[in-house]
Amino acid sequence: MKLTPASYLMLGMMRLGASSGYAIKKAADVSTRFFWPISLAQVYPELARLARNGYANRREDPHKARKRSFYTPTEQGRAALLAWLRSPREAHTQFRDEGILRLFLADMLTPEEQLELINRLRERAHKASHQIRDEILPVAQTLEQNGTRYPAIVAELGADTYAYVEQWLAALHENAPRQGD
Amino acid sequence: MKLTPASYLMLGMMRLGASSGYAIKKAADVSTRFFWPISLAQVYPELARLARNGYANRREDPHKARKRSFYTPTEQGRAALLAWLRSPREAHTQFRDEGILRLFLADMLTPEEQLELINRLRERAHKASHQIRDEILPVAQTLEQNGTRYPAIVAELGADTYAYVEQWLAALHENAPRQGD
DNA sequence: GTGCGCATGTAAGAAGTTACATGATTTA
DNA sequence: TAAATCATGTAACTTCTTACATGCGCAC
């Protein structure tokens, strides 16, 4: 059975204290959303798959009509997570951004439209940076109190990088290429 | 018929002078690869779809045994591309990065392993920045000579952003969080 | 008692990838 | 003449998304 980055994300979230599918999804929404978003329709089947293959224990809450399941990594699950973290295997990355694609083709627009587009992209970077600082970093900082530091580091990296892009686009807007430059 | 960002990418590449499926793929590899990669198995069916629906003209090279097709955008295709460029519709973005996901969960590693991981990510950013400068920017700069400026702007943005991340990770490596900080 | 957040799942489909299959043309 | 590159396409598969369906529990 092949584990994907989403599998490791989920095993990692279990280790950070999220034990139900719903909780894992909520946790991802306030932490990994900017570099590895997941959807509920992924989470439930993948949890079942992890349990079926010995990477997670499933424990059901019996005293409710509607059953709820709690998951914890097995020894095998913890070992697999650690092995992946240590593995030098080429990291899967995919970055797709329709906004940058528009900018790439912006020569077809009028100079005013070009400035508008640059401005929209700048605002988008601003918003991303602030969302990370306001919604994601505070959660990471509570984790920091019991010694889990990297979620906050990653959040800072994200917020700083978007702030850098924002500033870069602001400078481009100032000195935007004009006819005859 | 719904046009996707990949459709617009392909219409845009046609306008920049790439007229065959193969040429479009090659052009994307030295330009949009970092923010909208495409594969040949996407390109050919999508070109057929664009032609079938009136967004592109297909012209076949007849004097060869193995047929080659050249595409140009129709009036409808050019209009659709322009409308999309101007549209304020929310840009589709997806950023998935297994390396950052590893960093997010790096608290499970030993301090030495953490430094190694940071270093690998730093090197990766270094490589990306240089690939853009060495392989993508020069091509964009030849386009600049006939007034097409934005490909070079986008390449600069990419190279600078990766250089910023590289530098950020180098600083993290210097001041890496240690037991007892 | 109604709406919202918690909670679990399935179904259908979009988008993209890798591998396969084929053949032409160029260059060392 | 062999290898690399140009060139076009299909098949099978993976991953992920949206929409659907269901129901609990609490707060107002």
Image: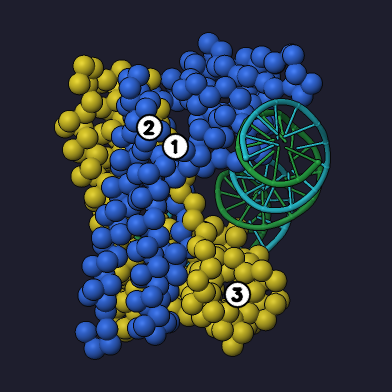
Chain colours: A blue, B yellow, C green, D cyan
Q: Amino acid type of disc 3?
A: Arg
Q: Are marks 1 and 3 on the same chain?
A: no
Residue B162 in the figure: left or right of residue A10:
left
Q: Are marks 1 and 2 in contact (CB under 8 Å)?
A: yes
| Secondary element type, mark 1 | loop
Residue B138: give x, y in percent of width and height: 28, 67
Chain under numbered label 2: A
Q: Amino acid type of disc 2?
A: Ala
Residue sitting nearer the eye, C14 or B16 = C14
* Residue A68 found in image quarter: top right
Within-10-Å neighbours for mark 2: few <14, some 14–19, many 20+: many
Residue on which the image places disc 3: B68
Quarter of the picture containing the C terminus of chain A is bottom left
* Residue B160 found in image quarter: bottom left
Q: Residue at x 30, y 42 (%)?
A: A157
Q: Residue at x 67, y 21 (%)?
A: A69
Quarter of the picture containing the N terminus of chain A is top right
| Secondary element type, mark 3 | strand
Residue on which the image places disc 2: A140
Q: Are marks 2 and 3 on the same chain?
A: no
Residue B59 in the figure: left or right of residue D24:
left
Chain under numbered label 3: B
Vertically, is A86 above or below A173?
Answer: above
Residue C9: give x, y in percent of width and height: 74, 32
Residue sitting nearer the eye, B136 or D11 = B136
Residue on which the image places disc 1: A31
Vertically, is C26 above or below A130?
Answer: below
Within-10-Å neighbours for mark 1: few <14, some 14–19, many 20+: many
Query: Spatial distance from mark 2 to mark 3, Cα to Cα?
Result: 55 Å
